[in-house]
């Protein structure tokens, strides 16, 4: 039973990931996110986190939390409130697909 649940969960998550439109996420990122996080998500400003290469589920949850107010940041809250559910999934998929400029230096 546990294995069946694991398989069904994997298929459900794959469906969510497949439903995301990376091209639409890229377009929205250029429109909304690029000023602070760079178009590819590799911000060079230490005040704005790098989004490229982050886990899709983490990015989507963070945006949902900004939108709901559970995560409190006036700037991000304002941007996130204007995003639809599809925008959030598309942005998360896009930034997760981008290579990060972070690396180990030791």
Image (cartoon, helix red, strand yellow):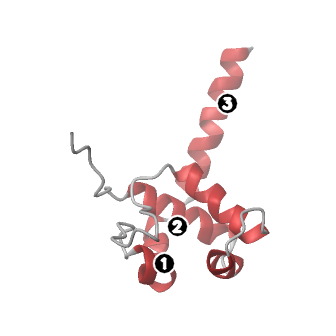
The residue tagged with tag 3: helix, strand or loop?
helix
The reply to whether the C-beta atoms of the residues labelled 2 and 3 are less than 8 Å apart is no
Kindly report which numbered mark, 2 or 3, lies closer to the viewer in this rendering: 2
| Looking at the image, residue 48 lies above or below residue 54 | below
Of residue 76 and residue 15, the one placed in the foreground of this image is 76
Q: Secondary structure at mark 1?
A: helix
Residue 97 lies left or right of residue 87; in this view the side is left
Mark nearer the viewer, 1 or 2: 1
Q: Which mark is residue 33?
A: 1
Distance from the alpha carbon under mark 1 to that under mark 2: 9 Å
Dots 1 and 2: beta carbons under 8 Å?
yes
Does residue 12 lie above or below 1 as drawn?
Answer: below
Q: Earlier in the sequence, mark 1 or mark 2?
A: 1
53 to 78, vertically: above or below: above
Which residue is found at the position 63% from the left and 59% from the top? Answer: 62
In the picture, the disc for residue 8 is 3
Q: Circle 2 — which element?
A: helix
Labels 2 and 3: the sequence-earlier one: 3
Estimate the spatial distance between the alpha carbons at disc 2 and disc 3, rounded to whole Å. Answer: 25 Å
Residue 68 point in image, percent of width and height: 78, 68
Q: Is residue 76 above or below residue 49?
A: below
Residue drawn at x 56%, y 57% as measured from the top left: 59
Q: Check if mark 1's residue and mark 3's residue have beta carbons within 8 Å.
A: no
At 61% from the left and 36% from the top, the residue drawn is 11
Residue at the limit of the structure toward the left, as seen here: 106
Dot 2: within a 10 Å radius of its alpha carbon, few (fewer than 14), some, or many (20 or more) residues? many
* Quadrant into which the N terminus falls: top right
Q: Residues within 10 Å of mark 3 (few under 14, many from 20)?
A: few
Please state the horizontal and vertical placement of residue 33, each as a whole percent of the image. Answer: 48, 78
| Image point (46%, 76%), residue name | 29
Task: List x then y, in percent, for residue 20.
Answer: 55, 60
């Amino acid at each position: 039973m546990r294995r069946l649940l694991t398989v069904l969960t994997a298929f459900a998550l794959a469906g969510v990931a497949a439903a995301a439109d990376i091209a639409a996420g890229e377009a929205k990122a250029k429109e909304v996110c690029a000023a602070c996080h760079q178009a590819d998500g590799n911000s060079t400003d230490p005040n704005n986190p790098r989004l490229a290469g982050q886990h899709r589920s983490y990015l989507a949850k963070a945006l949902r939390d900004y939108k709901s107010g559970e995560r409190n940041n006036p700037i991000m809250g304002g941007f996130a409130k204007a995003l639809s559910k599809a925008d959030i999934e598309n942005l998360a998929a896009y930034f997760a697909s981008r290579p990060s400029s972070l690396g180990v230096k030791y």
